[in-house]
Amino acid sequence: LKPPSAPKPEAARRGPPSLFGSQNDGAADRGFRGQAVLLLSGRHKHRDYGQEQLQAGAGLYSLCFGAAAGVAISGFVYVGRTMQVMLFDHEYYKLQSRKRYYEKQLIFTREQEETQAAHYLGAMAAEYDPAATRMPFKPLEPKYRF
């Protein structure tokens, strides 16, 4: 038979200090085995799963944080590009100048075409011979007179 042992002091029951400076308060004993024992014994306390997922480091928290950061960054990009277009975009003026130049060229070309068409009609009128349009040995009809 063994003699009765004296109770261990509190520090000896906790074990050696952990790497992060806090005392081991028996958390290792409540690991996976402890949860299994609690589940099998029916004494498992219901934890709020949603509350756990909204704490820093959880997957849902990280997804929500990333989505919010993405919306914020895209908003900053949108505002920045808008300011760039409003303050520093000179491409608009270049395009407007090119459009005006194109319109001037188009008007000039149309005037040239009208002039050429008028010269063509003038040349045709110079060669017009109304006598050639009458029937042989008949008088010239009034609609063919120039």
Image (cartoon, helix red, strand yellow):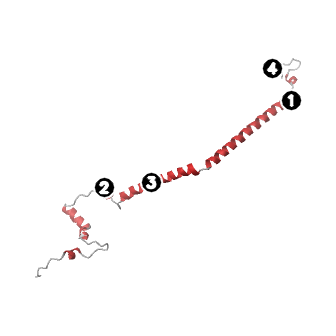
Disc 4/disc 1 C-alpha distance (Å): 18 Å
Residue carrying label 4:
143
**SS type, badge 2:** helix
Residue type at numbered disc 3: Ala
**SS type, badge 4:** helix
Binning the other alpha carbons within 10 Å of mark 1 as few (below 14), some (14 to 19) or many (20 upward) gives few
Disc 4/disc 2 C-alpha distance (Å): 98 Å
Numbered circle sitting on residue 50: 2
Given this view, does label 4 or label 3 mark the residue nearer the observer?
3
Residue carrying label 1:
126
1 or 2: tag closer to the N-terminus? 2
Disc 4/disc 3 C-alpha distance (Å): 81 Å
Disc 1/disc 2 C-alpha distance (Å): 98 Å
Residue 136 picture location, percent across and down: 88, 20
4 or 3: tag closer to the N-terminus? 3
**SS type, badge 3:** helix
Which quadrant would residue 141 be assigned to in this image? top right
Residue 45 picture location, percent across and down: 22, 59
Q: Is residue 45 left or right of residue 1?
A: right
- The residue drawn where x is 71% and y is 40% is 106
